[in-house]
C-alpha cells in the first residue's frame, strides 16, 4: 500500500533514546533519565480525587468541542492572576494536549505549502507536524548571543506565513522578555505573518515570571498545556487562546478532528488548577535540581551552556568534545548509565555538537546522574 509524501516525517530521537534506556533497564541496569521532558511527579492529588468523584457520579461522555465551560473560565481567571490580563473565556479552547493545539492552529492559519518560521534549536515536533500538514517549516538559526531565541532580523524579508516561538523554550529553557516579544509581534504585523506563542513551560520559572504574548497583543495564538507545570503529561489535555474571530474557525475544525479533549482529563485539569501547594512543592524540586545541574555539569566538563530561565532543561554546546552528538549520547548511556538527548532532535543543521539534559526527575536522581557524568568525563 502506498504512503503519502507528507507522512515522511523524521523520528523523534528522544523516543529512540528512551527505548535504548528501557532496553538497558530491562537488562538489569539502573539508568538515570535526563533525556525526557517529563515531570517525575504525577498529577496533583486533588486532580485524581476530583476525577474519582466524577466517575462515581456517572459516565463521562463527550463535551462540547471547545471544552468544559468551567475549565475555560478557570483558565481565563488564571491569566488575570498570573499576568493581569483580562481574558474572555470564550477565547479559550481546550485541546487534546498541546500537540492537538498545534494541529488545530496550523490547520486554521495556513494553507498547503505555506512557510512557517521556527527557531532552531526548537521543539522537533513543530517541524514534523508542519511537514505532515503539507506546510514548509523554515528553521531560523538562533545565536547564543540572543540566548537561542529568534529576533526580527532572523526572518526579515523571508515571506513567512507564520512564526512559532516558545518561551521558556525547549531545549534551552531561555525566555523572551516583554520587549523581545513586542519586537517579534511588531515584525510579524508588518509582514502579515501570523504569530503563535508556545507557552507550555509557563509556571516553571526561576528568577522572573514568563511573559505571555497576550500581554502584548490579542492578535495571536497562544498554546499551553497541563503537561508540564501541572504535571499531567499522560492525561493529554491542553488549551489555546485565539482571537475572537477565530473561535468558530477552531471550533469547526476541532469538532471534526477530535470531537473534544478527553472529558476525564478536563475534570482533573480543572481541579489541578487549585492545587497550588503541591505544584509549588514540585517547583522547589526543580529549583534545587537547576542549581545542581548548573554546578555539576560545569564540574563534569560541560561548560558551554545557556543558563535556563525556565522549564527543566540545560542545552550544552559540546563541540569541544564531539562532532557526533548521537554517538556521544549513546556512549554516555552505555558507559555512564545516563540517558541524554542529542541536539539533532532540536537543530538538524547544528545539533551534531549539542546535547540536552533534562532535570525534571527527583533531586536524588539528578545528583546521582551528575556524579556518573563527572566520573565518565574524567575517564574519557
Image (cartoon, rainbow, N blue to C red):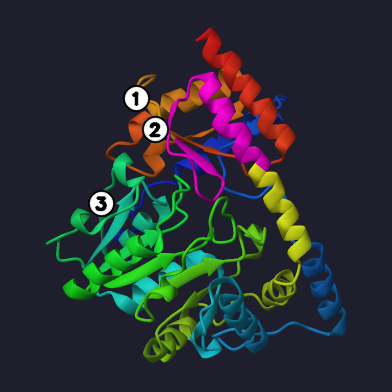
Residue 165 in the image: above or below residue 300 = below
Q: How many marks?
A: 3
Q: Secondary structure at mark 1?
A: loop
**Magenta segment, which residues?**
288-315
Q: Residue at x 62, y 26 (%)?
A: 370
Residue 260 in the image: above or below residue 279 = below
Please give the residue where the numbered disc 2 appears in the rendered image. 354
Q: Are marks 2 and 1 in contact (CB under 8 Å)?
A: yes
Residue 112: x percent and y percent?
Answer: 24, 71
Among the two numbered marks 3 and 2 on one chain, the one whose residue lies closer to the N terminus:
3
State the mark number for residue 138: none
Please give the residue where the numbered disc 1 appears in the rendered image. 319
Please give the residue where the numbered disc 3 appears in the rendered image. 140
Mark yes or no: residue 313 visible.
yes
Q: Secondary structure at mark 3?
A: strand
The extreme left residue here reads: 157
Q: Residues within 10 Å of mark 1 (few under 14, many from 20)?
A: some
Q: Are marks 3 and 1 in contact (CB under 8 Å)?
A: no
Q: Residue at x 67, y 58 (%)?
A: 231
Q: Residue at x 46, y 87 (%)?
A: 251
Q: Quadrant of residue 267?
A: bottom right
Among the two numbered marks 2 and 1 on one chain, the one whose residue lies closer to the N terminus:
1
Amino acid at each position: 500500500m502506498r504512503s503519502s509524501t507528507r507522512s515522511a516525517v523524521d523520528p523523534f530521537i528522544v523516543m529512540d533514546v528512551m527505548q535504548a534506556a528501557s532496553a538497558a533497564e530491562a537488562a538489569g541496569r539502573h539508568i538515570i533519565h535526563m533525556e525526557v521532558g517529563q515531570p517525575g511527579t504525577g498529577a496533583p492529588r486533588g486532580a485524581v480525587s476530583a476525577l474519582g468523584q466524577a466517575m462515581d457520579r456517572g459516565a463521562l461522555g463527550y463535551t462540547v468541542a471547545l471544552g468544559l465551560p468551567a475549565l475555560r473560565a478557570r483558565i481565563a481567571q488564571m491569566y488575570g492572576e498570573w499576568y493581569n490580563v483580562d481574558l474572555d473565556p470564550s477565547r479559550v479552547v481546550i485541546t487534546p494536549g498541546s500537540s492537538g493545539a498545534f494541529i488545530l492552529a496550523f490547520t486554521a492559519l495556513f494553507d498547503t505549502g505555506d512557510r512557517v518560521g521556527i527557531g532552531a534549536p526548537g521543539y522537533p515536533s513543530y517541524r514534523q507536524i508542519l511537514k505532515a500538514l503539507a506546510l514548509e517549516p523554515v528553521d531560523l538559526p538562533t545565536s547564543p548571543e540572543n540566548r537561542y531565541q529568534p529576533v526580527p532580523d532572523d526572518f526579515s524579508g523571508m515571506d513567512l506565513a507564520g512564526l512559532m516561538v516558545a518561551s521558556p523554550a525547549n531545549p534551552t529553557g531561555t525566555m523572551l522578555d516583554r520587549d523581545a516579544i513586542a519586537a517579534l509581534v511588531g515584525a510579524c504585523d508588518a509582514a502579515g505573518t501570523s504569530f503563535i506563542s508556545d507557552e507550555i513551560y509557563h509556571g516553571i520559572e526561576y528568577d522572573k515570571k514568563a511573559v505571555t504574548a497576550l500581554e502584548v497583543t490579542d492578535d495571536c495564538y497562544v498554546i499551553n498545556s497541563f503537561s508540564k507545570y501541572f504535571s499531567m503529561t499522560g492525561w493529554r489535555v491542553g488549551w489555546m487562546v485565539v482571537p475572537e474571530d477565530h473561535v468558530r474557525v477552531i471550533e469547526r475544525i476541532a469538532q471534526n478532528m477530535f470531537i473534544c479533549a478527553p472529558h476525564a482529563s478536563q475534570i482533573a485539569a480543572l481541579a489541578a488548577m487549585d492545587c497550588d501547594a503541591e505544584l509549588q512543592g514540585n517547583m522547589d524540586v526543580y529549583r534545587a535540581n537547576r542549581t545542581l545541574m548548573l554546578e555539576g555539569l560545569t564540574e563534569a566538563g560541560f561548560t558551554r551552556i545557556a543558563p535556563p530561565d525556565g522549564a527543566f532543561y540545560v542545552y550544552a554546546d559540546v563541540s569541544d568534545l564531539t562532532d557526533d552528538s548521537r554517538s556521544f549520547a549513546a556512549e554516555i548511556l552505555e558507559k555512564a548509565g545516563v540517558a541524554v538527548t542529542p541536539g539533532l532532535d532540536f537543530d538538524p543543521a547544528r545539533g551534531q555538537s549539542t546535547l540536552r539534559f533534562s532535570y525534571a526527575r527527583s533531586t536524588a536522581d539528578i545528583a546521582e546522574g551528575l556524579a556518573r557524568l563527572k566520573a565518565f568525563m574524567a575517564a574519557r
